[in-house]
Image: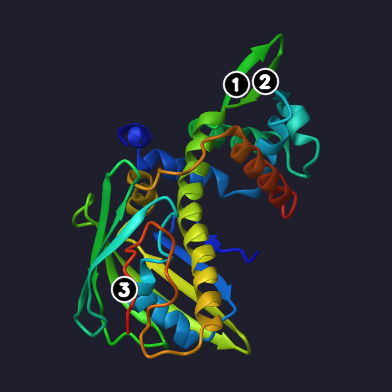
């Protein structure tokens, strides 16, 4: 469990903050296809190259990209780990509730198929829960 | 398959979960407040669950435990505020490995025709609390993979081409 906490919550907030902007998300999407220069990144947008550079600074600060020089051009590179931390956080929460609700769906269907009883216990659950059956 | 929608806006200490169920809201309410039913759906399938107490009335307390397959326990407890009813449930929520970090859950069941929309609004004490909460204990069972990263990037890319 400790390993999960290596990227602290504050770091995660920085990552989510950087991801909150649609232009920055589009830049990350472009970088997923390969490294790119500022000019290449700015091409699909109506905003100026300096504006794109400011977005790149935010992404770099969040650790989402790194930048290197190739000859005269500055290349941006997608860093996968912070995104992976961010997705893992959401994935954990999603997994917990999606799975719970899928199970609840099944339970509700089973309860509605049963003839109505006063006792709320339904048909025997799977093997992990208490196997005692309501004898009433 | 119906999807559970989860909205966690960056910078806000809140998470909103919604899901449609094909069931009357009274039945959903029962599934949420009857311990015998609750253990049959809450949490990952791989985790056994027990309910220590669930006193669904104003000021009543609740506590339940998820058990990982290796025996490790994750316990949660809280207090009901106002009388829980099919109109809604208001309760505090605390993960026992993070004492003092309490969130407030407001659950509503909105019935329309044969469908009931479940909505859970969870408010945390801070953004750090929200972001730190799940990662501290709910890692179990979640695949760590580039696949998810790919999915996210695909979603982000699509989202990014609006309003840039």
* Mark 1 nearby-residue class (10 Å; few <14, some 14–19, many ≥20): some
Where A131 falls versus B131 (above or below)?
Answer: below
Determine which residue is flagged by label 1: A67
> What separation in Å lies between label 1 and label 2 (alpha carbons)?
5 Å
Say the numbered circle drawn on residue B35.
3
Secondary structure beneath label 1: strand
Q: CB of mark 3 within 8 Å of CB of mark 1?
A: no
Q: Is residue A54 left or right of residue B33?
A: right
Q: Is residue B20 left or right of residue A4?
A: right
Between tags 2 and 3, which lies in front?
A: 3
- Report whether mark 1 lies on the same chain as mark 2: yes
Please state the horizontal and vertical placement of residue A127, each as a whole percent of the image: 40, 58
Q: Is residue A80 left or right of residue B16?
A: right
Q: Please name the residue shown 25% across and 56% down the image.
A: B75
Please state the horizontal and vertical placement of residue A70, each as a whole percent of the image: 69, 11
* Mark 3 nearby-residue class (10 Å; few <14, some 14–19, many ≥20): many
Between tags 3 and 1, which lies in front?
A: 3
Q: CB of mark 1 within 8 Å of CB of mark 2?
A: yes
Where B111 falls versus A58 (above or below)?
Answer: below
Q: Quadrant of the N terminus of chain A?
A: top left
Determine which residue is flagged by label 2: A75
Q: Please name the residue shown 43% across and 77% down the image.
A: A122
Q: Chain of mark 1?
A: A
Secondary structure beneath label 2: strand
Where A62 falls versus B24 (above or below)?
Answer: above
Q: Name the image quarter holding residue B37.
A: bottom left
Please state the horizontal and vertical placement of residue B35, each as a whole percent of the image: 31, 73
């Amino acid at each position: 469990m400790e390993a999960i906490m290596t990227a602290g919550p504050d770091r995660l907030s920085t990552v989510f903050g950087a991801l909150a902007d649609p232009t920055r998300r589009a830049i990350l999407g472009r970088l997923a296809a390969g490294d790119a220069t500022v000019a290449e990144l700015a091409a699909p947008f109506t905003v100026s190259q300096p504006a794109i550079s400011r977005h790149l600074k935010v992404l770099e600060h969040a650790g989402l990209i790194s930048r290197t020089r190739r000859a005269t051009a500055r290349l941006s590179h997608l860093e996968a780990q912070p995104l992976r931390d961010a997705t893992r956080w959401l994935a954990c929460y999603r997994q917990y509730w999606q799975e719970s609700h899928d199970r609840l769906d099944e339970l509700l269907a089973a309860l509605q198929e049963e003839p109505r009883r006063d006792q709320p216990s339904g048909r025997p659950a799977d093997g992990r829960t208490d196997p005692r059956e309501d004898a009433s | 398959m119906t999807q559970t929608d989860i909205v966690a806006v960056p910078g806000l200490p809140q998470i909103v979960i919604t899901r449609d169920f094909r069931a009357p809201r009274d039945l959903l309410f029962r599934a949420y407040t009857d311990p015998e039913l609750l253990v049959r759906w809450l949490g990952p399938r791989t985790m056994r669950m027990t309910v220590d107490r669930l006193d669904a009335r104003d000021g009543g307390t609740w506590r339940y435990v998820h058990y990982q397959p290796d025996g490790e326990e994750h316990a949660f407890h809280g207090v009901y505020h106002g009388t829980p009813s099919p109109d809604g449930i208001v309760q505090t929520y605390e993960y026992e490995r993070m004492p003092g970090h309490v969130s407030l859950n407001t659950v509503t069941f909105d019935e329309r025709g044969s469908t009931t929309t479940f909505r859970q609004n969870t408010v945390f004490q801070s953004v750090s609390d929200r972001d730190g909460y799940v990662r501290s204990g709910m890692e179990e069972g979640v695949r760590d993979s580039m696949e998810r990263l790919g999915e996210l990037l695909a979603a982000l890319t699509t989202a990014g081409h609006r309003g840039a």
